[in-house]
Image: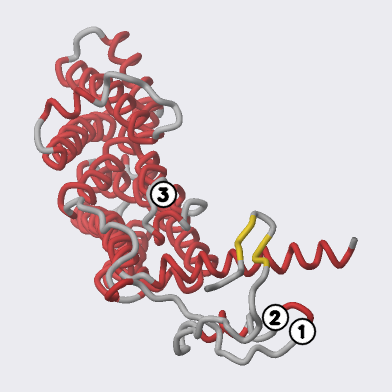
Amino acid sequence: MSRSSVRRDGVHGERPGRQAPGGQGTATTAPLARGRRRGRGGEELMVPGAEFTSYYGRPIIKRPTWRARDIAGYFFLGGLAGAGSVVAAGAGATGRPVMARALKVSSLAAVTGSAAALVHDLGRPARFAHMLRVLRPTSPMSVGSWLLSAYGPAAGAAAVLDLTGRLPRLGRAATGSAALLGSAVAAYTAVLAADTAVPAWHDGYRELPFVFTGSATLAASGMALLASPVGENAPAVAGALLGTAVETAAVVTMERRLGMIAEPYRHGRGGRLMRAATALSAAGAAGAVLRARRSRSAAALSGALLLAASACTRFGVFHAGVASADDPKYTVLPQRERLRRRAEEAAAASTAE
């Protein structure tokens, strides 16, 4: 019978040489295992470093049950609507009425589609209403539900009053409210995804809001180029450049910081979509800069490329997250790495004392 015991301050009474054997190392886990080759006091361990595993190779966390067309579509349409309201307010304030009206109408259509995708994922409309029973500031889902509920009527009023030309003062107030709420609608879904246990989303919490904001700017700029006359395209061209720069920089920074966890953003379905997004946004931005202010057809083509780039980013992020949830290594290895780092920091602190 074992006489060892585990207490809050460690294991007591253990018998030397009776350690449980670890598993076989792999190329993926070797760097982490090398950090444990020596025990306390510097003695060489006689067994290889233990590696992660999971029961029958099954995922450790539950795979998201969200469907791509619902939730990735919800991400894309929400970004298009929110950023579109911001650009519409700016276009109206700078004397570009056609662009402003087109973006107000597209934002109303997009937020309607976004809400429909969310309700379809929930199963029935009553479940969305149930989420409005309470407001929990610590819950991105609760805050997002209320945000969407406030933004939708504002975007609708802005579009309808602009089309009908009635109540201009109320129309301007609705446009301003939609722009204010739209900036949050465009980015809050990144917080919603990062608040889950999905490794590729959760660990990307620093950069993901910038990825989504840049993607939303691309979508709104693309819609403006697609629906506006050439003479009003200057803000859309600037938006295309800004969105491309923000999204590209945020994705590169995120992949560099995440290290191994960023693999789903480079490989598989998520990787293909992210690469397509990069190529489409670069082509759309280049076309916007070179031809969008001189050619209507070139502006429309550039706008379509930017919209496609934004959609690819949202679907790429979605599929990368699902792939990271399916593979146990993206859950276990970062946890072990954090434990090792904390142990090293604690040892360094005790040595300094």
Foreground mark, 3 or 1, reads 1
Q: What residue type is labelled 1?
A: Gly
Distance between mark 3 and mark 1 Cα atoms? 39 Å
User: Is residue 284 visible to the viewer in this orientation of the structure?
Assistant: no
User: Is 246 in front, or is 271?
Assistant: 271
Query: Residue at point 35% right, 39% down?
Result: 186
Q: What residue type is labelled 3?
A: Ala
Distance between mark 2 and mark 3 Cα atoms? 36 Å
Q: What element carries label 3?
A: helix
Distance between mark 2 and mark 1 Cα atoms? 6 Å
Which residue, given by chain and number where applicable, does mark 1 sit on?
42
Q: Position of residue 326 (x, y in %)?
A: 29, 67
Q: Which amino acid does label 2 sit on?
A: Gly
Which residue, given by chain and number where applicable, does mark 2 sit on?
39
Q: What element carries label 1?
A: helix
Q: Where is residue 317 in the image (x, y as percent from the top left)?
A: 32, 59
Which residue, given by chain and number where applicable, does mark 3 sit on?
194
Query: Residue at point 52% right, 69% down?
Result: 256
Q: Where is residue 248 in the image (x, y as percent from the top left)?
A: 44, 62
Q: Disc 3 or 1, which lies upstream in sequence?
A: 1
